[in-house]
C-alpha cells in the first residue's frame, strides 16, 4: 500500500475518535514527507532537532512540525521560531528554556508534558506525582510564552495488551484530573498524545486525542539518514 493510501486508511479509522494523526517521519527523506503532504497530511513528527532543521527548508511552510524526541535545552533555540508542538517536556528546566526562547521569538510555544507511564527505565518522562506538584504549586504560571496543551506518554514495549491498556488508562486519569482541577492562563487541556504504530488502536479506545504513527506509514526506518 502506498503512503497516500495508508494515510487515507488511518484518517478514516481515527475519524470517529476525533483524533489527530502525527506522521512520524524521523529517518525518512523529504520525498516521503512530500508524498504524505500531497495526500493531505500536515502534521509530522521528528525525533531530532537537526533532522527537522535539515528537512524544513526542503518542504512546504504549511507543515506542522512536532518535536517528539527528547529535547536538550541547548537545542530549543533552533526550533522555537516555528515548532508547532513540543511533545517531550519532562522538566521545569526545559520549560524555562522554552519560555525564554518563546519570549525572544514573540510567540507562545505549545507543549505537552511527557509522563513516564512505562515500566522501562529507558523511556523519558516526568513522574505523575512530580507533575501534580508542579501544577499544585503553580510552578508553571510564570511561563507566559508556553502553553501546556496536555500530556504525552509511551506505553511499555510489550505484547501484553492489558498492560499497555492499563498504562494508557492511568495517563487518561491524570489528564482528566488535571482538566478538572488545574486551570491557569497557560494551560489548555486539549491534547492527550498516546499510541504509536503497534498500540494506537488501544490508545484510541482509552481516550487518546493524538496518535503518532511512523513505520505503518513510511515503512521501516532508514537509520543511515
Image (spheres, rainbow, N blue to C red):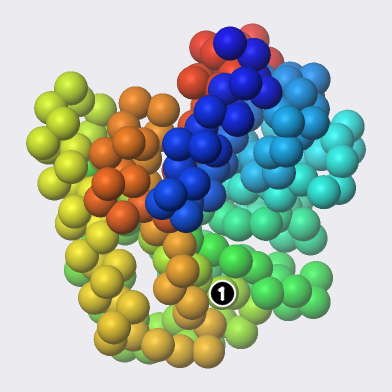
Q: Nearer the viewer, residue 8 or 112?
A: 8
* Residue 5 versus residue 64 in the image, above or below: above
In percent of width and height, residue 219 lies at 55, 13
Q: Residue at x 79, y 31 (%)?
A: 38
**Can I make out residue 108 in this image?**
yes
Residue ID for mark 1: 147
In the displayed structure, does residue 199 sit left or right of residue 42?
left
Q: Residue at x 60, y 30 (%)?
A: 8
Crowd tier of the residue under label 1, counting other residues whose Cα lies within 10 Å: few below 14, some 14–19, many 20 or above: many
* Residue 200 versus residue 103 in the image, above or below: above
Q: Residue at x 67, y 57 (%)?
A: 84
Tag count in the figure? 1
In the displayed structure, does residue 172 sit left or right of residue 212?
left
- Image quarter where the C terminus lies is top right
Q: Residue at x 30, y 67 (%)?
A: 175
Q: Secondary structure under badge 1?
A: strand
In percent of width and height, residue 49 lies at 67, 41
In percent of width and height, residue 173 lies at 20, 65
In percent of width and height, residue 29 lies at 74, 20
Q: Nearer the viewer, residue 51 or 197?
A: 197
Q: Nearer the viewer, residue 85 or 37?
A: 37
Amino acid at each position: 500500500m502506498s503512503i497516500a493510501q495508508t494515510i487515507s486508511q488511518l484518517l478514516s479509522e481515527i475519524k470517529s475518535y476525533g483524533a489527530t494523526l502525527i506522521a512520524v517521519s524521523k529517518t525518512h527523506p523529504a520525498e516521503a514527507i512530500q508524498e504524505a503532504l500531497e495526500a493531505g497530511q500536515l502534521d509530522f513528527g521528528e525525533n531530532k532537532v537537526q533532522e527537522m532543521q535539515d528537512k524544513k527548508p526542503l518542504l512546504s511552510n504549511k507543515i506542522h512540525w512536532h518535536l517528539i524526541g527528547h529535547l536538550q535545552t541547548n537545542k530549543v533555540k533552533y526550533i522555537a521560531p516555528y515548532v508547532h508542538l513540543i511533545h517531550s517536556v519532562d522538566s521545569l528546566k526545559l520549560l524555562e528554556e522554552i519560555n525564554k526562547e518563546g519570549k525572544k521569538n514573540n510567540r507562545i510555544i505549545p507543549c505537552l508534558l511527557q509522563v513516564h507511564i512505562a515500566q522501562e527505565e529507558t523511556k523519558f518522562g516526568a513522574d505523575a506525582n512530580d507533575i501534580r506538584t508542579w501544577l499544585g504549586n503553580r510552578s508553571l504560571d510564570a511561563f507566559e510564552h508556553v502553553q501546556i496543551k496536555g500530556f504525552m506518554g509511551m506505553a511499555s514495549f510489550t505484547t501484553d495488551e492489558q498492560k499497555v491498556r492499563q498504562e494508557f488508562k492511568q495517563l487518561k486519569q491524570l489528564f482528566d484530573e488535571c482538566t478538572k482541577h488545574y486551570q491557569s492562563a497557560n494551560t489548555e487541556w486539549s491534547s492527550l498524545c498516546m499510541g504509536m504504530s503497534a498500540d494506537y488502536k488501544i490508545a484510541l479506545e482509552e481516550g487518546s486525542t493524538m496518535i503518532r504513527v511512523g513505520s505503518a506509514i513510511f515503512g521501516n526506518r532508514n537509520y543511515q539518514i
